[in-house]
Amino acid sequence: AIKEGQCVLLSESKTDGSFLIHHFLSFFLKAQCKVCFLGLVQSFSHYSTVGINMLQAREKGQLVFFEGLRNSLDMLLPESDASDAEPQPLSFLRWPSTDLRNLFDFVNSSLSQSENDMSRWASPVLLIDDLSVLLSLGVNPTAVLDFIHYCRMAVCSKQQGNMVTLVHNEDDLGDEDCDLVLHALTHQSSLILQVHGLNTGYCRDVHGQIQLRWKDKFQLKRDHTHVFQYKVHDKGVSFFAPGTSSAVL
Ligand SMILES: *[C@@H]1O[C@H](CO)[C@@H](O)[C@H](O)[C@H]1NC(C)=O
């Protein structure tokens, strides 16, 4: 149960945590939330093949999908006839010194609800898959955190919506920028889901381990932590207590 106004952090390492993004996307679409999805990793058609009716949601105006792959090509290829009159959300690719202001403006205007929207949709949700792509593109971590800060203010504080951010992290590489961003997001999130590949390598019956951490807002109580193992299959994911799959015993 995620309360309105809260942030969720998903971190994946040595495994593919995209099933979590699919889970939250379908959860919020079913809850009739207005959703802005920054798909920086995969194309729209990739996400829409996982059994979520995204096309329909987009046609209804419930879902605004930002396709990072296509937009970054438009931005990088000088021949493309992307109109210069309109601010481009990924303009930072052409001018790396600039911040993520245009990307924020895109999020903010996608989720700013007109009165008509407000009667139709529940609170707004921002999903980001995945934030570390921005770091790989050379955006400085301070600019990434400023962007997150503005999004939190606009989506979570002002509109009592939710934000779900995936960060890919290879924890043994010692990537300082990524650590900095993860550390800051950990403080700002009330639910943290960390997925990790199995240390023993690939296993047919267990795909990895997931840790759920609910944080107490006022830090008065200790965090609630649960650990599960999971297996992803065609129709979804199954979770079980560590060691209870016959394959790992
Ligand atoms: C977000 O959008 C709303 C409505 O369009 C606008 O009033 C507000 O100033 C914007 N927020 C920021 C920080 O630009």
Image (cartoon, rainbow, N blue to C red):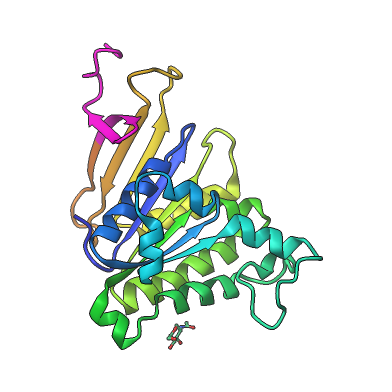
Q: Taking 88 as reference, is 19 left or right? A: left
Residue 1 visible in the picture: yes
Residue at screen point 49% across, 46% down: 46
Q: Nearer the viewer, residue 178 or 54?
A: 54
- For the residue pair 177 and 45, the one nearer the viewer reads as 45
Q: Is residue 223 above or below residue 140?
A: above
- Can you give x and y, in whole percent of width and height, for residue 52 in the image? 34, 50
- Region in magenta: 227-249
Q: Is residue 75 magenta?
A: no
Q: Residue 230: horizontal and vertical position, in percent?
A: 30, 30
Displayed quadrant of residue 127: bottom left
Q: Quadrant of the N terminus?
A: bottom left
Tell me the residue at 21%/48% (across/down): 222
The answer to which of 154 and 18 lies nearer the viewer is: 18
Tell me where residue 50 appears, x and y as whole percent: 39, 44
Residue at the image point whose x is 29% and y is 35% from the top? 237
18 in relation to 183, above or below? above
Whether residue 130 is visible here, answered yes or no, is no
Quarter of the rendering containing residue 28: bottom left
Quadrant where ligand 1 appears: bottom left
Judge from the rendering whether residue 118 lies leftward or rightward of residue 142; answer left or right: left
Taking the spot 75% from the left edge, 61% from the top edge, the residue there is 76
Q: Position of residue 57 (x, y in %)?
A: 36, 63
Quadrant (top left, top right, bottom left, bottom right) of the C terminus? top left
Number of disc labels: 0
